[in-house]
Image: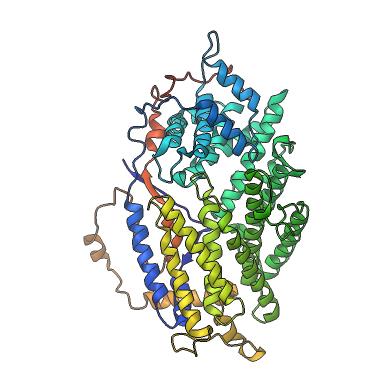
């Protein structure tokens, strides 16, 4: 069985976790040593080894016999912890349908219902302690595997609300660490179904159920795509689905669901206006105008949130909120959304602000630093659990970590250097906790070694250590030394023209002394294909993405997508019947 990579890449090669040869040279020049390069090379080896450790979860999926779960408690936990954030189900209708399945003269269970039911139980089981960071482990995954085993059949079924809800529930489950990589596979099919069903004519409760399902999926897909550097499957200009009112998502007068949707729309506009390939040739003025507009919209979104612990930058902080923990979880998510977006658009502004606007560039760089510090301050509030979305558990905190790491290295005598080091230690502790909680499956503790390098450097150069020859102190800028000032800044903060020239020089240096292969030599040197499909070791030109530490190799999904595993899909109640036009429509 061929393995498939389940990665946790955040924002592609432009990610803060991506170490190119040029970035490594910039850090080495500033530090005066190559310890970061050595650490990244070691991480590259660890990632390569980690990804070659294939996790086998589907070889016995079809024959697995799961014990009957505590259905009532798992369903209750789902509707207490998951449903208020993603309110796409009607609890009364769901439980009534579940209770009727064992009764005589009832329409046989559809495959869509089987997948939906077991995914709801799997999500509830995660909150009951049945989850795992490793694919294929735990009671929760055992339940989710029933839905996965039905995935092929779901793809072949006609569009229906129950099918869409099944894919939406599976998407929510796939956001966790154990399903890294599956989210895109499942989500793409869910998005296709959602857009197809916009033209369907629902009646009664089904109309509201579809709208809530559509917008729940829209938010999940937009946020996941943006933070993973992928284009969205939703075409915003073709959306005609009204935004519904979800009473279950109101927290003390705060409409979480509506706020969630507004932010997802903002992310969508940001991606298409700033990061899409079609706008890459636009001038700097275009980018700066768009960033100003998006920044204004972000601030409008922020002030529309009540200052009861939910508003980023408000008087009441999330950790001081009283009452249920779910409201605090939503508040932390809102803060992550805000500061992550602020950090992203501010970084983009630095790429397009001209080098001559030194004061403006420093102000924007301070905004990036503030956003990163705010993100890391929230890190202790993250629930280190299998159900926490990957972008929140590791992606955004680690990106904020490397912002502060680079800023601290390039300005070790900053008044904030000491507190920045303390914040780096917070993320290092968080990553180590993740390694501990995952029982070593996720080698997160290596992140702490970057914090150790930064602390040693600041102590030697900027911490009153009497000066040191181990590094260079960034010069104060003046109109005469703008060039030196730019080259003393983090690589990701440099204007685009500067980084392009640096990359061009690096590529020339990397290839100038290579021996080109002649036609005859090329024929003689042909080797067999790598039929296992394992990753090639990262080259100096490609660079290394540290987020690879949070990825897995798992068996290929081909058996699920093409063989169907029919007849073995429901370990609890036998084989579900195929869907038809009379299938039960949930909600």
Whole-percent x and y of residue 398? Answer: 51, 61
Residue at the location (70% across, 80% down)? 359
Relative horizontal placement of residue 477, taking residue 532 as reference (left or right): right
Residue at the limit of the structure toward the left, as seen here: 524
Residue at the limit of the structure toward the top, as seen here: 105
Q: Is residue 534 above or below residue 520?
A: above
- Residue 353 in view (yes/no): yes
Whole-percent x and y of residue 430? Answer: 49, 58
Q: Nearer the viewer, residue 450 or 15?
A: 450
Query: What color scheme is it?
Result: rainbow
Whole-percent x and y of residue 402? Answer: 52, 67
Residue at the location (39% across, 40% down)? 137
Quarter of the image containing the N terminus?
Answer: top left
Whole-percent x and y of residue 284? Answer: 67, 70
Residue at the location (44% across, 64% down)? 447
Task: Please give the count of numbered marks on the rendered protein.
Answer: 0
Q: Quadrant of residue 355?
A: bottom right
Q: Nearer the viewer, residue 154 or 512?
A: 154
Q: Is residue 207 above or below residue 340?
A: above
- Residue 201 in view (yes/no): no
Q: Nearer the viewer, residue 13 or 309?
A: 309
Q: Nearer the viewer, residue 281 or 20?
A: 20
Quarter of the image containing the C terminus?
Answer: top right
Q: Is residue 290 above or below residue 493?
A: above
Q: Quadrant of residue 507?
A: bottom left
Relative horizontal placement of residue 509, taking residue 337 as reference (left or right): left
């Amino acid at each position: 069985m061929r393995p498939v990579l389940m990665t946790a890449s955040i924002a592609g090669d432009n990610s803060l976790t991506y170490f190119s040869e040029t970035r490594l040279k910039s850090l080495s020049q500033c530090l005066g040593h190559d310890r970061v390069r050595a650490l990244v090379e070691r991480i590259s080896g660890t990632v390569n080894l980690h990804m070659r450790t294939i996790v086998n979860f589907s070889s016995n999926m079809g024959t697995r016999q799961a014990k009957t779960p505590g259905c009532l408690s798992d369903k209750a936990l789902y509707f207490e912890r998951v449903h208020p954030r993603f309110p796409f189900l009607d609890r009364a209708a769901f439980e009534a349908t579940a209770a009727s399945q064992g009764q005589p003269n009832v329409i046989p269970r559809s495959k869509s219902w089987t997948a939906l039911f077991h995914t709801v139980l799997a999500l509830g089981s995660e909150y009951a302690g049945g989850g795992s960071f490793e694919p294929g482990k735990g009671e929760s995954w055992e339940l989710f595997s029933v839905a996965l085993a039905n995935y092929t059949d779901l793809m072949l079924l006609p569009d229906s609300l129950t099918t869409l809800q099944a894919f939406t529930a599976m998407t929510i489950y796939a956001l966790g660490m154990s399903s890294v990589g599956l989210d895109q596979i499942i989500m793409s099919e869910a998005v296709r179904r959602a857009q197809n069903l916009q033209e369907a004519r629902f009646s009664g409760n089904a109309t509201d159920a579809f709208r809530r399902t559509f917008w729940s999926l829209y938010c999940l897909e937009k946020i996941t795509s943006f933070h993973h550097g992928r284009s969205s499957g939703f075409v915003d200009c073709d959306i005609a689905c009204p935004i519904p009112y979800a009473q279950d998502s109101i927290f003390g007068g705060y409409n979480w669901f509506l706020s969630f949707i507004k932010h997802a729309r903002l992310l969508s506009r940001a991606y298409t206006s700033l990061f899409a390939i079609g706008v890459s040739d636009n001038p700097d003025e275009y980018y700066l105008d768009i960033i100003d507009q998006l920044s204004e919209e972000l601030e409008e979104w922020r002030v529309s949130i009540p200052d009861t612990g939910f508003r980023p930058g408000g008087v009441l902080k999330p950790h001081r909120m009283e009452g249920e923990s779910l409201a605090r979880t939503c508040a932390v998510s809102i803060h992550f959304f805000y500061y992550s977006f602020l950090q992203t658009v501010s970084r983009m502004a630095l790429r397009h602000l001209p080098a001559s606007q030194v004061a403006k560039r420093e102000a924007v760089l301070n905004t990036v630093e503030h956003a990163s510090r705010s993100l890391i301050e929230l890190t202790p509030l993250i629930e280190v659990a299998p159900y926490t979305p990957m972008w929140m558990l590791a992606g955004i905190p680690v990106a904020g970590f490397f912002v502060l790491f680079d800023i601290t290295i390039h300005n070790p005598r900053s008044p904030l250097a000491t507190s920045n080091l303390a914040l780096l230690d917070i993320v290092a502790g968080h990553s180590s906790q993740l390694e501990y909680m995952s029982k070593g499956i996720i080698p997160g503790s290596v992140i702490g070694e970057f914090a150790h390098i930064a602390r040693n450097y600041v102590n030697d150069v900027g911490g009153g250590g009497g000066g040191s020859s181990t590094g260079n102190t960034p010069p104060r800028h003046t109109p005469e030394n703008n060039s030196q000032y730019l080259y003393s800044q983090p690589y990701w903060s440099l204007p685009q023209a500067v980084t392009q020239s640096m990359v061009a020089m690096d590529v020339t240096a990397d290839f100038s002394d290579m021996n080109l292969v002649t036609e005859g030599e090329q024929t003689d040197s042909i080797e067999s294909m790598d039929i296992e499909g394992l990753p090639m070791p990262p080259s100096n030109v490609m660079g290394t993405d540290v987020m690879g530490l949070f990825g897995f190799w798992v068996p290929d999904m081909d058996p699920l997508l093409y063989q169907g595993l029919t007849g073995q899909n429901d370990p609890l109640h036998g084989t579900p019947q195929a869907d038809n036009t009379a299938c039960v429509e949930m909600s």
